[in-house]
Amino acid sequence: EVSGPVPIERGIELSHGATIHGHLLDAGGGGLSSETVSLRCYTDIQGHGLNKDEKWDTTTDVEGRFTFGNLAAGGFQLSWWSPAREDSVRFYLGQGLEILGTEGVDVVLQPRGHAALHGTIAFDGELPEVVVVSIYPQPDEPVDPTRALWARCSWATVVDHGCFRLEPLEPGEYEVSVEFTCETDASGRSTAVVYGEARVVVPEAGSAEVSLLLERDER
């Protein structure tokens, strides 16, 4: 007897529990093959030996399809980090799921939207060779703080000569932030960081612009 969620391939279902049937697509609707999709428990699930933050991985097939089977009722999070591209853009796709019984659940993970974000950063000091900008959509409804880490999709890109660009984005309000260590002590512990954040509203189509003023923070 299998006591927890088990990654299974090509739609093969185990004897009991719910099954997630998923499809991982790129922005154009094409399936992404040989990618790792993760499933994480939101909470402890009594009687099934599942602990909060336990995680399982599976791999998409040639059409971008994936399956997780034998799931007990409870809260789960599907997630996928895109591999780094030539333009250094990465994004995280996540979706929370509540399993209520033994019925199957169909899920599509896909970056959506038709807008672009153009941004600049300014700092009165020397920037490292690589500066990563993180972009998080702000939910319309409050998010359970115990799930906040995994409840939001996010994007990350690298600044080039003080500028960055990211697309495609869905319309809505986003938090844009930068943070990096600029000073450490003899043990390697961070003693000063550079940080900046801003909010920006992205339209249905076209582009939005945002500027980040970075400031040094002693710790």
Image: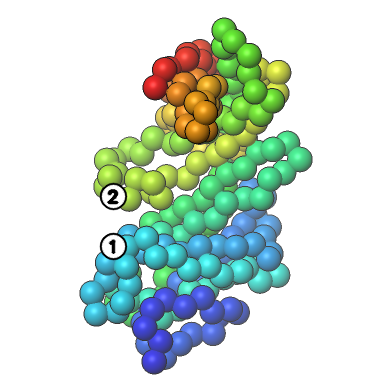
Would you place residue 148 above or below residue 13 in this image? above
Would you place residue 169 above or below residue 101 in this image? above
Nearer the observer, 104 or 198: 198
Residue 101 in sight in this render: yes
Which residue position holds label 2? 146
Q: Which mark is residue 21?
A: none
Q: Going 27% across and 40% down the picture, which residue do you hit? A: 142
- Farthest-out residue, right: 86
Q: Going 46% across and 60% down the picture, which residue do you hit? A: 78
Q: Going 32% across and 50% down the picture, which residue do you hit? A: 147
Nearer the observer, 87 or 112: 87
Of label 2 and label 1, which has the lower sequence position?
1
Residue 158 lies, in percent from the top left, at: 65, 31
Dot 1: element:
loop
Task: Compute the Cα span from label 2 to label 1.
Answer: 9 Å
Q: Quadrant of the C terminus?
A: top left
**Left or right of 119: which side holds 148?**
left
- Farthest-out residue, top: 124
Dot 2: element:
helix
Would you place residue 131 above or below residue 46 in this image? above
Q: Quadrant of the N terminus?
A: bottom left
Which residue position holds label 1? 43
Image quadrant where residue 4 sits: bottom left
Badge 1: few (under 14), some or many (20 or more) residues near its Cα, within 10 Å?
some
Would you place residue 158 above or below residue 21 in this image? above
Nearer the observer, 106 or 150: 150
Residue 216 lies, in percent from the top left, at: 47, 15
Total numbered badges shown on the rendered structure: 2
Mark 2 touches mark 1? (CB < 8 Å): yes
